[in-house]
Amino acid sequence: MKTANFEAILEAYERIKNRVHRTPVLENQSINQIVGNQVFFKCENFQKVGAFKFRGATNAIMQLSDDEKQTGVATHSSGNHAAALALAAQQNNISAHIVMPNNAPLVKQKAVEGYGAFITFCEPTLEAREATLKKVIEATGAIEIHPYDNNQIIAGQGTAALELLQEIKHPDFLLVPVGGGGLLAGSALAAKQLSPTTKVIACEPLGADDAYRSFCAKKLIPSRNPQTIADGLLTSVGKRNFELILNYVDGIVTVSEESIVQAMQLIWERMKIIVEPSSTVPLAALLEKKIDTKNKSIAIILSGGNVDLSNLPF
């Protein structure tokens, strides 16, 4: 099975740079003092659709042939990839068919509808998602754009780390949240090429720790009934992603739900920006001192900012 490489990230960057936002890198002195580090936040919560996912979706759609564009695209997603693919499809006059679990946050459902996609709801299990998507593809002939286990998606997501490392030269650590592993795989590829001394650490909720367990066992262990407030990190790691993670990621740590909420509240209050729980898992790892980072520079990718404001955890 072929996997993505650094050249694909460079090509993706050139392909999508006029379609995506180059998001800012922010620093906050209060947070620096609290964790005892210099921390740089790459704010993908300011990306189109409010998440890094727009990078991969745009990269994938821009590489479709004319014939493939006629039949449209399809995917399953709990939210951010769904919205990203829906908007990228809309911008290219392509139809999008999205399978969403019926417990997906309302804010994410509304976003997908707003971008003109056709939504099919299913039970909130991976098996139900994949079975429903198969039926949708059979009915429509649409091309599947997998949320993370897709080389074009991985390359597109890697452009966030590419931009970050163009601005922040050789941080000691790059901390990345991990769900399906698209952002992590792309980020690790970019980091090991641009800044080989930077340690890439994945951060994951303890209640959805399949990446951690898979990494320790050196074999894929699927997620079973994950329980976490970080709804963007519920999915199992993809096969292509896991191969890259094993080769390029230095470690994976897990954090408690309490720390995720604490980190989320800290970013809202001190930085005055909206981030979703999945984004805050790396900062939670610093708060829990899960990594020995004394007097080190830390780069963190804030993955998204799509939150149901009527259902905040604090």
Image (cartoon, helix red, strand yellow):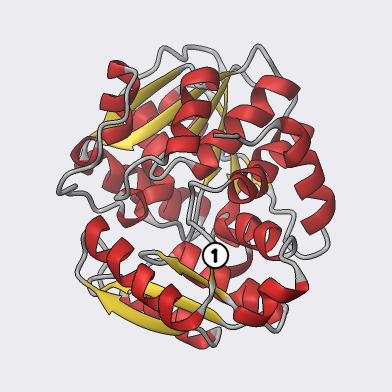
Q: Is residue 161 left or right of residue 113?
A: right
* Image x and y of residue 259, in percent: 26, 38
Residue kind at label 1, given as amino acid type: Gly
Q: Give whichever of 106, 59 is nearer the camera.
A: 59
* Image x and y of residue 71, in percent: 61, 80
Residue 170 seen in the current view: no
Residue drawn at x 25%, y 32% as measured from the top left: 221
Residue 148 seen in the current view: yes
Q: Is residue 21 left or right of residue 258?
A: right
Residue drawn at x 41%, y 45% as measured from the top left: 180
Tell me the quarter of the image containing the N terminus: top right
Q: Is residue 107 left or right of residue 192?
A: left
* Image x and y of residue 125, in percent: 21, 59
* Image x and y of residue 24, in percent: 69, 50
Instruction: Tell me if mark 1 has few (under 14), some (14-19) or many (20+) residues whose alpha carbon lies within 10 angstroms of its own.
Output: many
For disc 1, the marked residue is: 50
Residue drawn at x 52%, y 51% as measured from the top left: 271
Q: How many marks?
A: 1
Q: Give whichever of 93, 41 is nearer the camera.
A: 93
Q: In the displayed structure, would residue 83 be above or below residue 94?
A: above
Q: In the displayed structure, would residue 107 be above or below residue 167?
A: below
Q: Give whichever of 87, 290 is nearer the camera.
A: 87
Q: In the displayed structure, would residue 169 be above or below residue 295?
A: below
Q: Give whichever of 128, 88 is nearer the camera.
A: 128
Q: Quadrant of residue 179?
A: top left
Tell me the quarter of the image containing the C terminus: bottom left
Identify the secondary structure beneath mark 1: helix
